[in-house]
Amino acid sequence: MTERTVVPDSLEEVRSLFGDFDENIKIVSGRFGVKIVGRGGEIKINGEDESVFRAAATIENMLGLLRRGETLNEQSVRYIADMTGDGRDEELSALGGDCVCVTFTGKPVRPKTVGQKRYIEKIRKNTVIFGVGPAGTGKTYLAVAEAVRAFKAREAHKIILTRPAVEAGEKLGFLPGDLQNKVDPYLRPLYDALFDMLGAESFAKHTEKNVIEVAPLAYMRGRTLDDSFIILDEAQNTTPEQMKMFLTRLGFNSKMVITGDITQIDLPDAKRSGLVEAVGVLDGIEGIAQCRLTDKDVVRHRLIQEIVKAYEKRANKGNLPVKNGVKRFYKLKGKK
């Protein structure tokens, strides 16, 4: 048995480390199988040698995040513990302090994982970016946040958000209302992200001026999009023809971010996914980047990460049905 001591700078840091009802420290102790107690402003860790070393490193990394102005919650503590347990804790030093933009309510939007940090960096350095990963990794939300930042900084004069109008398995039938009413349900996640960043009133004002546009992918045909920040969401549900059409809309001084989850393709079985094809065809072209987010980048409920892991494990065993190029994508998955 080994004991190690971590000494925070203040009692406030100790309280933040432990969390409400000691929930943060319970996550760390459960992850590494050690006993952790606080005594007189010090944190004592007892257990097997390697486990104590990893737990102490996790607490030090938690302290580092706190000192860079971040707050700790269940998601961030689990992420730090997993990264430290995998021996990747040096990468955590990149986190914290990088605010993409501030929401309408004053909340700073920051990348919460190393993968998300890399995603933002690639968006800023390239013209066309493919952000591919499972649900809950912040692909769309961070892209919208970066679009709003670029718009406010006058780096882009217009924000255009689009997605294919493909039903997720179920048939919705005839929807009431005019054309806009019929396509709005497909675009709701994009509206939600913009409302969060700008507020409903500001969003409505910019929409009326036509400097923010949210529209189905079909509306992009025949256009050239200059001076714009363009986001294509749910790109796994595009056909190769639609993807080519979209990519060739790129105009001068514009940026495109294409996001999608290759495991959630809702196209008919005979249709290939345009996203799967594009990440292979365009690989290696200067100015075009790919960022693969994984289950470790999930920032929603803890169970989403477990669900993603279970499905990915099944896919890697070869049990996933051959559909729309999914197996081909998993062969390419090792590329970052």
Image (spheres, helix red, strand yellow):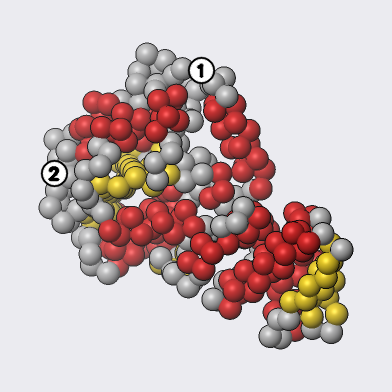
**Residue to which mark 1 is pinned:** 321
The first of marks 2 and 1 along the sequence is 2
Q: Determine the secondary structure under disc 2.
A: loop
Q: Quadrant of the C terminus?
A: top left
User: Label 2 belongs to which residue?
Assistant: 224
Q: Which residue is rendered at x = 36% and y = 59% of the image? A: 121
The crowd level at tag 2 (other Cα within 10 Å; few <14, some 14-19, many 20+) is few
Residue drawn where x is 84% and y is 62% of the image: 47
Give the number of the mark in front: 2 or 1.
1
Q: Residue at x 47, y 53 (%)?
A: 115
**x, y (%) of residue 104?**
45, 66
Q: Nearer the viewer, residue 75 or 219?
A: 75
Q: Tell me where residue 79 sits by quadrant.
A: bottom right
In the rendered structure, the answer to whether residue 335 lies left or right of residue 42 reads left
Percent position (x, y) of residue 320?
53, 21
Residue at (66% x, 48% y) in the render: 302
Residue 189, relative to residue 77: is it above or below?
above
- Estimate the x, y position of residue 170 in percent, counting from the top left: 51, 22
Amino acid type for the residue under numbered disc 1: Pro
